[in-house]
Amino acid sequence: MTVVSAPGKVYLFGEHAVVYGEPAVPCAIERRATVTVEPRDDSHVRVEAQDLTLDGFAVEYADSPDDRPDVDVPKPLLDAATGYVDAAVEQAREAADAPDAGFDISVDSEIPLGAGLGSSAAVVVAGIDAATRALGEPLDRRELADRAYRAEYDVQDGQASRADTFCSTMGGAVRVEGDDCTRLDTPELPFVVGFDGGAGDTGQLVAGVRSLRDRYEFAADTVEAIGDIVREGESLLADADPDSDPSAELIGELGELMDINHGLLSALGVSSRSLDTMVWAAREAGADGAKLTGAGGGGCIVALDATDETETSLQYTTDCEQAFRAELATEGVRLEE
Ligand code: PMV
C-alpha cells in the first residue's frame, strides 16, 4: 500500500490571467488530499472517495472509465470526482510503461471539490505519485508536476495553467508564467479562507473570460492589469525577509493589491453574490485585503488578517459555510506510508 498526500492552494494573485500568459502567485496551504494506492492482479481500477462528493462512492471498472457501472451519484459529480483520478492513472501507466496496470485507489480529501482551493490538482499530484511509486517507478518532482499538468489539461479540455499542479507538487509560494515555474521564498502570510459551500465550473468560467477578452479590448486590458498586480505583488514579496514575520506594512500593501485583483476578477464576471458578500464581510472585519481564489463562480475567498476578527466574522456571515485559517504548506507532495 502506498499513501501520498499533496496540498491544496489559494491564489494570492493572478488566477484567470495566468491562462493567457500573465504571471500568477499561488500559495500551497495545509489542507491535503491523501491518495492510497494498491496495485491489483488485473487491469481494473477501483476508486473509492468518501468525501469528494456528499455521500461518498466506490466504483470499479475494467480497462476504460467508459465501462464504469452505474452508481448512486449524479453523473456530473461522479465524472468530476473520478475524471481526475482516471487521468492520474493514465499518466502513471504511461510513466511506468505499464499500460495494463490495475489499482485499488482510495481518496481522502480535506479540500472541497471545485471551490478554488486546488482539490483536483492535489488529487492528481498525489495520485500519480502514489501510483508510480506503487509500480516501483517513482518520478522526480519536475516530471511529476509536468504529468499532473497534462492530466488536468486533458480533463479540462485544454483550459488549464501549470499553476495549481506545480504549486501542489512543490509546496510553498510559487510563481507561474506560461511554462516557467519557480518557487518563491516568502514569509508566512496570515491567510483566512471563507467557503460558501458551493463550487464553480472552471471550464465555463475560463470560457466566459476568454469570450470577453476576445470581444472587448478593455477586457483584454483588464487581464493585463491583473498581470501588473502580480508583478507589483512579487516585488513586494522579493523585498521581504522570508525568515521573519511579515511587517504590517507588507500585509497592508499586499491586501490592497488583493482588493484590486478581486475588483478586476469581478469585472470579468467570475465573482458571485456569496463570494462578494464574504469579501466584504472580511474587509469590514478588518482584513487587510480579500479576494476570490481560483476559478470563482462560488467556492472560496482568501483574506489576509493577522488577528482572529476575520475568521470569527466570516463564521457569522450567512453566505459563509466554513471559515478557517490556512497555514502555508511549505512541503508539497509527500509520501505518508
Ligand atoms: O478553481 P481552481 O483552483 O481550479 O483554479 C482555476 C484557476 C484558473 O486560472 C481559472 C485556471 C487555471 O488552470 O489556471
Image (spheres, rainbow, N blue to C red):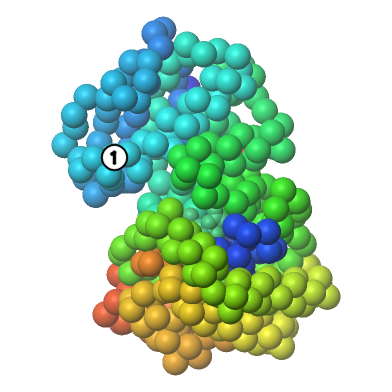
Q: Residues within 10 Å of mark 1 (few under 14, many from 20)?
A: some
Q: Is residue 134 above or below residue 317?
A: above
- Seen at 52% across and 50% down, the residue is 159
Per the image, label 1 sits on a secondary structure element best described as helix
Q: Quadrant of residue 336?
A: top right
Residue 50 in picture, x, y percent from top left: 29, 40
Residue 252 in picture, x, y percent from top left: 65, 87
Q: Is residue 48 above or below residue 322?
A: above
List the residue tagged with mark 1.
78
Could you say which is closer to the camera, residue 334 or residue 13? 13
Q: Residue furthest front?
A: 215
Q: Is residue 157 above or below residue 313?
A: above
Residue 24 in picture, x, y percent from top left: 66, 63
- Seen at 20% across and 43% down, the residue is 74
Could you say which is closer to the camera, residue 68 or residue 311? 68
Q: How many marks?
A: 1
Q: Is residue 278 left or right of residue 217?
A: left
- Seen at 45% across and 50% down, the residue is 119
Q: Residue furthest left?
A: 72
Three-letter amino acid code of the residue under disc 1: Leu
Q: Is residue 73 left or right of residue 231?
A: left
On the question of residue 105 being in view, the answer is yes
